[in-house]
Image: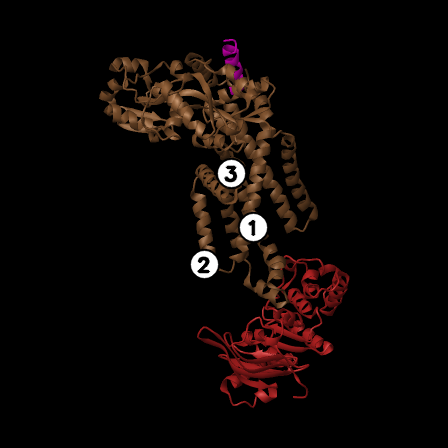
Chain colours: A brown, B red
Amino acid sequence: MSFPNDPRWGEALAHLPDYLGNHVRVSLAALALGLAVSLPLAILTRNRPAPRAVLLALASIVQTVPGLALLALFYPLLLAAASVTLAWFGVSFSAFGFLPAMLALALYSMLPVLRNGITGLNGIDPALIEAAKGVGMTPRQSLTMIELPLALPVMMAGIRTAAVWVIGTATLSTPIGQTSLGNYIFAGLQTQNWVFVLFGCFASALLALAVDQLLGLIESGLRHRSRLRTALGGIGIAALVAATLVPTMGRSSQSYVVGAKTFAEQYVLSALLRDRLQATGLSATARSGLGSSVIFEALKAGDIDLYVDYSGTLWANQLHRTDIKPRAELLADLKTALAKDNITLLGDLGFENAYALVMPKKRAEALGIRSIADLAAHASTLSIAGDYEFFSRPEWAALQKAYGLQFRAQRQMQPDFMYAAVASGEVDVIAGYTSDGLIAKYDLTALDDPKHAIPPYDAILLLAPKRAGDGTLQSALKPLLGKIDIATMREANLRASGNDANSSPDAVAKWLWAKVGRR
Amino acid sequence: MPSKPAISYSHVSKNFGSLKAVDDVSLDIAEGEFLAIVGGSGSGKTTLLRLANRLIEADGGTITVEGEDVQTVDPVALRRRIGYVFQSGGLFPHLSVADNIGITPKLLGVPATDVTARVDELLELVQLDRTAHRDRLPEALSGGQRQRVGVARALAARPRIVLMDEPFGALDPLTRDALGEDFRELHRKLGLTTVMITHDMTEAILLADRIAVMRSGQLLAQGTPAELSTSSDSYVLELLRTPRRQVERLNTLLPQSGAA
């Protein structure tokens, strides 16, 4: 199939109104807030060197925080703020999605606006400010009639820089639950769908260019006192906002939101759950690419209605338990514990996606390694790679303790690249996932864990507190419980990792339903 | 002094840190008078001028403008009724010639049509072509034209007092001469009280009724050129010697000029 005719372009296009609309809304709201804060600050501090220096230093520090980290920080911050307002004023707000994304992006937009604002205002010839005073202007008149118009070109350059930064960085707001053009990039990267990645990059670049040019038009209109150009630029921005507001206006707030974390299996399962709800006549959307810690809090707060998590993950991260129990016992304990938060553990899907130490089958045979206990003897000459969270998780500590593992080197990798890396010998061992289809594809083997250091990781379906008594929802989901065995999930994941039209999460979800639906 | 003073300085002083910019100066400027303040750079002449419309606030002494203590008047209102011509124009680069000239009437709330009429009147008064210059930006004007616009702007709100800070200093000699003469004529025709700062004694002698000489913040002498020539102060005499020497040398070098 030729690249331009790939049906995934059409699929990407179908998401555009939603993704673009959300992206424009969060970017422009952040920019507006950033301007509303930064411009007055720039004006207030223009003649006060000490506060000005402090302000610029703070804005620069914010700028050195990576965009993703800044966005991630706002989520727990707002979560804490929300619990405070709930306790004090009885009102709570969602710390998920729009609000943290907008606040973090607004903070991000401040440096160029502040710096250019201050530079522009300070760069004005003092003789002109003296002249403004001399002809009888009040300080306010001097500011609005002389200083601001003269500083305008420099200030607008800062605003345009901020706009481009914010639109680019907004693609990183996907993991904290704000739908954006980043959804293409995150989903594409996870499912090796390069069409999506390219589409997301082009769309956000085009949006940034368009907004930059429209702001440029406004600037030149103001500078040359051309009402036409200013109006055209203003109308352009307004049209952009209006166009992105329209498609989502009619969206029902009663819609069920299915969450998904940032890896291929989650994309497939959320598509499957969404399809099941829609087949029962319920309105449902998927909110994918959510960070692992964000997603549970989002469920608890009711920002999403359901998602699939793994028993061992919740056991360690939410219950903070380090002991390891047999499968059934752990599930029962988990169910009781989650019920305290009014979260329903509806049941398990039938497969486990546990961490497992994985290496090429031939290599393992050559070294005589069958279990992690065998591996321990060779570990000091081997290197290991894991995903971004593995080495800070309790499982890793438990593994090291149980088997006395000491590797020569450890590296962090994007999960999708780990399998190819271990297959090619780039690293010797990886901390992979048992349900991953790539294990079969690259002829790898998952090593036994005779001491049961790694807890069970059954895929379980969780429902938000507000859906606890929702019979329609529960009966729509019941047909999936216990139906998906590990072999089927591996095959689904392998399909999802392909790079063709049949590998999109939607297509794989349909394949999966065709396979398990009649069971 | 035939009439009451338009501006009166009484024991006025102003310090910038340890520097005495203006040191116990007393000076009266009569209504209708053209006074030139002469002095080298750092002599305090610009500071003295700016104290009159409170662009700079005095540390001590009293300044009255048309009989009122300036400390009791709103500084913004005070500046709107005193014309001020800045060194090299001080025109706002983003505003047209017409908007520059009409700025003070506009601030005073004069209706837009009246401002337009007044701008045309002033362009004629300072001898600028209405259609050619009205809508231009200052950058499109020559130095002399810019200074004419600066004078028009100072006169726009019909002030009775005009303060000028080295208005012709940056111009070529021909333009400077023409502009000086033209302004002297406006001063007479409009019955203005004018205070002009200059470092050029020749210009002061040719334009002003009276001259005040400043040095190191102090007022050394004041009077008509003839009165000053009888001064006992060596610096004042030195200042007066310069134009004299120039005339003598010019007469020697340009015997056919017939000017002297």
Q: Residue furthest left?
A: A377
- Lower sequence index among marks 2 and 3: 2
> Circle 3 — which element?
helix
Residue ID for mark 3: A101
* Residue A515 falls within the magenta-colored stretch: yes
Residue A442, position as x, y percentages in the image: 38, 15
Q: Is residue A370 above or below residue B162?
A: above
Disc 3 sits on a residue from what chain? A
| The quarter of the displayed image where residue A64 is located | top left
Quadrant location of the N terminus of chain A? top right
The quadrant in which residue B34 appears is: bottom right
Please report the bounds of the magenta region as a residue range: A505-519
Numbered disc 1: secondary structure: helix
Report the front residue among B128 and A43: A43
Residue bearing the label numbered 1:
A155
> Mark 1 or mark 2: which is in front?
2
Q: Nearer the viewer, residue A369 or A141?
A: A369
Nearer to me, A319 or A252: A319
Q: Are marks 2 and 3 in contact (CB under 8 Å)?
A: no
- Of labels 3 and 1, the one closer to you: 3
Question: Residue A148 at x, y = what percent?
Answer: 59, 55
Give the CA distance from mark 1 to mark 2: 21 Å
Instruction: Determine whether, in the image, residue A20 is placed left or right of residue A422.
Output: right
Where B22 falls versus A436 (above or below)?
below
In reply to whether residue A177 is colored magenta, the answer given is no
